[in-house]
Image (cartoon, helix red, strand yellow):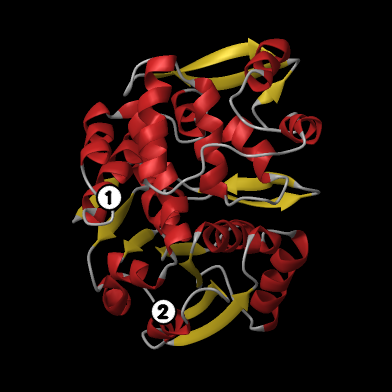
Amino acid sequence: MTLTMNLGPRSYDIIVKRGVLQESGTLLNLDRKCLIVTDAGVPKQYAEAVAAQCRAPVIVTVGIGEGSKSFPVYETLCRKLLEQDFHRSDCVVAVGGGVVGDLAGFAAASFMRGMDFYNIPTTVLSQVDSSIGGKVAINLDGVKNIVGAFWQPKRVLIDPDTLHTLEPRQISNGLAEAIKMACTSDAELFQFLEQNDPLENIEHVIIGSLQIKKSVVEQDETEQGLRKLLNFGHTIGHGIESTGKLLHGECVGLGMLPMCSEAVRKRLLAVLKKAGLPTTVSFDREAVWQAMQHDKKFSAGMADIVTVDEIGAGKIERVTMEALKARFDSAYMEG
C-alpha cells in the first residue's frame, strides 16, 4: 500500500509492503553516494541489502539506544560525510528504529544546509510513528529532542517483514504509539486493538496509525496547533524516560494514563496490559518533575497537554504548571 504525505513541494510517498527492503534500489534514488546509518541492534543484513543497491554506499553503525542521539555521534556522522566528500546532491538513508531516524535525519537536515533523506524503519515504533512527519533531533544534557529540525524524508519504505527479528519488549514498545494515536483520534482503531491481536494484524495497525499521523501532519506540519495531539502521553512520559529505567513507548503508555477520564483510563489500562506494556512504575518523583520542566511544550509557567475524555476525541489544553503537577502528583504510579 502507498500513502502520500501531501505537503506541497515536500510531499512524499510512504510505501508499506512486505519485502520492500529488497526493492529500495528501484524505489529510491540510490545512484549516488549514500550514507547508510544503522545501529548495532539492527540485523546487519538490512543495511547491507540497501547498500547492495547503492552506487556508492558508506555504512555507519552507531550504538544502541538514546545515547546515540548526541552531539558526539552526530559529529561522527557529519565528519564521515565530510571525509567521504559527500555533497548536497547525495543522500542519507536511515535503516533502523526511531533513534537512527532522528539522528540520521538531523545530519541530513544540517550538513551543507540539507541533503536528501530516506527513512527505512525496522521497528514497530518507527513504522507506526516516528519515520514520517519530518521531526529530526538529538538530545542534550538529558533533555530529549531539544536540538533538532523539521526535515521531511523524500520517501519512506516500511517492510513489516523486518519486525520478525524484534524481541517482544520492543514490539510492545512500538505498539504504545499506535495505542496513543488511536486513543486521541480513531475510536474504531482503538476498538480494533481491544478486540484483536495487534501482532497478527500488524499491517492493519501500521497503516491505521500512519493514516492518523499523516492527516495530522498535513494540517499542521510544524506543530503550531493540531500536531500537538501526537504528544499525548509524552509530557509525563519524557520525564519518566529521563530516569533511564524504561523504553520510550513504555513511558508514553504510562504518561497517557493520568491524562484520561476514568472511563477512558479503564479501557486504556486493558489495552496497555494486552500489548505487554507496564501500567505502574516506581520512580523519584522530584527528579521526574524537574526533567519534565525542560520540555519544549512548557513556556511562561504554562504547559500544553493532551487529554482524552472520550476515545477518539483528544484535545489540547493549556494549563498552569500547578494544574499539571496536580495531575502528576495524583497519578496512579507507585513511588
| Closer to the camera in the image, 49 or 232 | 232
Amino acid marked by disc 1: Pro
Q: Is residue 238 left or right of residue 30?
A: right
Q: Position of residue 11 (x, y in %)?
A: 34, 48
- Above-or-below relation of 240 to 155: above
* Separation of marks 2 and 1 at Cα, in angstroms: 24 Å
Q: Residue at x 71, y 45 (%)?
A: 242
Q: Which mark is residue 198?
A: 1
Image side of residue 248 versus residue 326, left or right: left
Which quarter of the figure is the C terminus placed in? top right
Q: Position of residue 154 (x, y in %)?
A: 40, 58
State the mark number for residue 46.
Answer: 2
| Residue 235 spot, x, y in % from top left | 61, 30
- Mark before the other along the chain sequence, 2 or 1: 2
Horizontal side, residue 75 vs residue 53: left or right:
right
Residue 128, numbered label:
none
Residues packed near mark 1 inside 10 Å, few (<14), some (14 to 19) or many (20 plus): many
Tag 2: residue type? Tyr
Q: Residue at x 64, y 83 (%)?
A: 84
Graded by Cα atoms within 10 Å as few (under 14), some (14 to 19) or many (20 or more), the crowding at tag 2 reads some
Task: Write down the quadrant of residue 177 in the picture.
Answer: top left
Q: Under tag 2, what secondary structure? A: helix
Q: Residue at x 24, y 74 (%)?
A: 19
Percent x, y of residue 201 = 21, 53
Residue at image coords 42%, 49%: 276
